[in-house]
């Protein structure tokens, strides 16, 4: 059967994303839209609207437009939002790059998306410039003053160019191309249209009910679709104020929450765990906080309860994928409607079916199976990857999530496990296949498998099971891998075994190792 949530469907307008998100910017005037947490530097709504149009016109005057891609490689700063929408105003497409990405990963993404321009910050130039040069990027821009090999970001703004008219046809144009490991392990370019993102803002708002008087903490990375949809697009559409953080530090996070009177916090499980247990929380006044929304990875119900009791606010979960813009279910601000083990009711305009893992037939309410989703937030598809598209988008508008769960009779979604084997380390996606491919390159490794190992702080950490062909220690292997991957992809634990469990076809049976690991950890 097909499940729907308790909400009526909503109409999705045929409009461009910048016109939709910034529709009321002039009315909000001098109200702060984005505040840089560390410095207090502020962009008002009036400035945001004007600067977005000026940037779009400046890009258009350089010949940038439909079919061109602009890469953003930056931490969370106020300029992120205006750049994203300025690119769309020029009828271009954004690709958002993980701020922890290695030079090699940046180059791969720039090549895959055929990016023409790149924006970064001075601290990232050592990675950005060689990647851009290798990928054939036309020009690199840097926030602040120009540097060797990079032009000043300010040079992009038009001083007299006519504004670009963005017609409704742009609703079906690609707005964002973030990276996702999808369901098959290796990084893919997800194509999200402007209509996908407009729809998901409206769908999410029907449940989250963000208000103009809300102050939101921008700690979720904007390169990730969770932060981009909720903290950039939804918050700015509703006239809320977003306080940005370039990097997470617990005490600075708590200080900014207190200083700005944050009312709504979209977080990931490790931060919620800190709010529930870390002694530093008691030093700050967080009484303005009304709701915490946790996403990107499952959050144990006991942690929800502990954080809610300590902070005297509502702590709930949501669920989604990069491929669904991302939100498919979320909980409201009404504590009476919260179900802590659930990721919330299914959003408007969203259908869920649960497929039996053996037969593929529809499951009834409360029966576990693979979650499939259909709605206007479902991606156009992966870029240049027909094989992955054929698997993930089987037809009739459905998307296979690769997650296991069920829906109850009231339309609340429960995610209980994952078919796909991504490791969620502090909210970052770590594809085990890439680490396995790297490990077997070590001369002392005969075979390897990587799985998520439960961790109280990070949620999950990558653990490698290794079959040795020569003498090597666990520390040596972890150091060797860490020199070749971004910090969040490091192997954190190693166990040496005699044989990697595999199927007759040669596929690693990670589930066997996961079950063994869970039994050992209790």
Image (cartoon, rainbow, N blue to C red):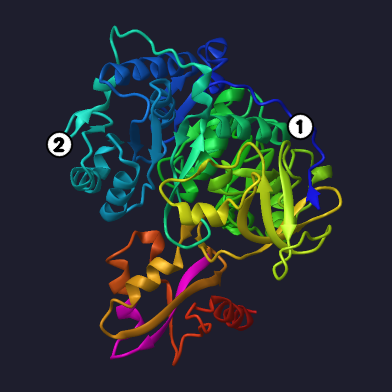
- Residue 147 versus residue 163 in the image, above or below: below
x then y, percent, for residue 298: 63, 58
Looking at the image, which residue is at 45% across and 89% down? 497
Observer-nearest of 177 and 123: 177
Observer-nearest of 288 and 349: 349
Would residue 27 be counted in the magenta stretch?
no
Looking at the image, which residue is at 82% across and 44% down? 337
Q: Judging from the image, what secondary structure is the residue with disc 2 in?
A: loop
- Residue 431 versus residue 219 in the image, above or below: below
Looking at the image, which residue is at 31% across and 21% down? 59
Mark 2 and mark 1: span between their CA atoms?
50 Å
Residue 32 seen in the current view: no
Q: Is residue 283 left or right of residue 344?
A: left
Q: Is residue 4 left or right of residue 161?
A: right
Observer-nearest of 81 and 179: 179
The part of the image, by quadrant, that contains residue 492 is bottom left
Q: Which residues are magenta?
A: 460-477
x then y, percent, for residue 434: 39, 66
Would residue 470 be counted in the magenta stretch?
yes
Residue 149's disc number = 2
Residue identified by numbered label 1: 9
Q: Residues within 10 Å of mark 1 (few under 14, many from 20)?
A: some
């Amino acid at each position: 059967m097909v499940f729907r949530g308790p909400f009526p469907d909503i109409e999705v307008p045929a409009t461009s994303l910048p016109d939709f998100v910034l529709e009321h910017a002039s009315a909000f005037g001098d109200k702060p839209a984005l505040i840089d947490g560390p410095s207090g530097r502020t962009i008002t709504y009036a400035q945001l609207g004007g600067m977005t149009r000026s940037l779009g016109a400046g890009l258009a005057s350089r010949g940038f437009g439909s079919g061109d891609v602009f890469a953003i490689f930056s931490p969370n700063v106020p300029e992120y939002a205006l750049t994203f929408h300025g690119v769309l105003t020029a009828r271009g497409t954004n690709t958002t790059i993980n701020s922890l990405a290695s030079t090699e990963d940046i180059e791969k993404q720039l090549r895959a998306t055929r990016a023409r321009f790149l924006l970064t910050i001075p601290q990232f130039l050592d990675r950005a410039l060689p990647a851009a040069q290798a990928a054939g990027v036309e020009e690199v821009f840097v926030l602040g003053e120009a540097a060797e090999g990079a032009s000043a970001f300010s040079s992009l703004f038009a001083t007299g160019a006519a504004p670009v008219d963005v017609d409704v046809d742009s609703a079906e144009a690609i707005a964002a191309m973030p990276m996702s490991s999808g369901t098959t392990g290796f990084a893919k370019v997800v194509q999200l249209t402007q209509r996908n993102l407009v729809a998901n803002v409206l769908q999410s708002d029907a449940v989250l009910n963000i208000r103009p008087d809300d102050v939101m903490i921008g700690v979720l990375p904007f390169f990730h679709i969770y932060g981009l949809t909720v903290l950039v697009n939804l918050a700015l559409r509703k006239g809320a104020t977003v306080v940005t953080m370039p990097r997470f530090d617990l005490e600075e996070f708590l200080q900014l929450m207190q200083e700005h009177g944050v009312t709504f916090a979209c977080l990931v499980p490790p931060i919620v765990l800190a709010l529930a247990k870390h002694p530093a929380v008691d030093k700050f006044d967080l009484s303005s906080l009304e709701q915490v929304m946790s996403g990107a990875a499952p959050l144990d119900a006991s942690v929800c309860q502990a954080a809610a009791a300590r902070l005297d606010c509502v702590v709930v979960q949501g669920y989604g994928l990069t491929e669904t813009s991302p939100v498919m279910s979320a909980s409201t601000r009404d504590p009476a409607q919260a179900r802590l083990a659930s990721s919330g009711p299914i959003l408007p305009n969203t259908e869920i079916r649960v497929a039996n893992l053996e037969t593929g037939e529809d499951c009834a309410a409360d029966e576990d199976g693979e979650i499939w989703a259909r709605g206007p937030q479902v991606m156009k598809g992966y870029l240049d990857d027909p094989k992955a598209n054929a698997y993930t988008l089987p037809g009739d508008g459905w998307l296979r999530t690769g997650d296991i769960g069920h829906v109850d009779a009231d339309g609340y979604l429960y995610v209980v496990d994952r078919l796909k084997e991504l490791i969620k380390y502090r909210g970052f996606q770590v594809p085990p296949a890439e680490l396995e491919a790297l490990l077997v390159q070590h001369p002392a490794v005969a075979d390897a498998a990587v799985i998520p190992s439960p961790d109280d702080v990070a949620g999950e950490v990558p653990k490698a099971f290794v079959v040795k062909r020569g003498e090597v220690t666990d520390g040596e292997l972890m150091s060797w891998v860490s020199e070749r991957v971004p910090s969040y992809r490091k192997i954190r634990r190693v166990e040496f075994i005699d044989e990697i469990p595999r199927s007759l076809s040669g596929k690693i049976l990670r589930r066997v190792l996961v079950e063994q690991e869970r039994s050992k950890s209790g």
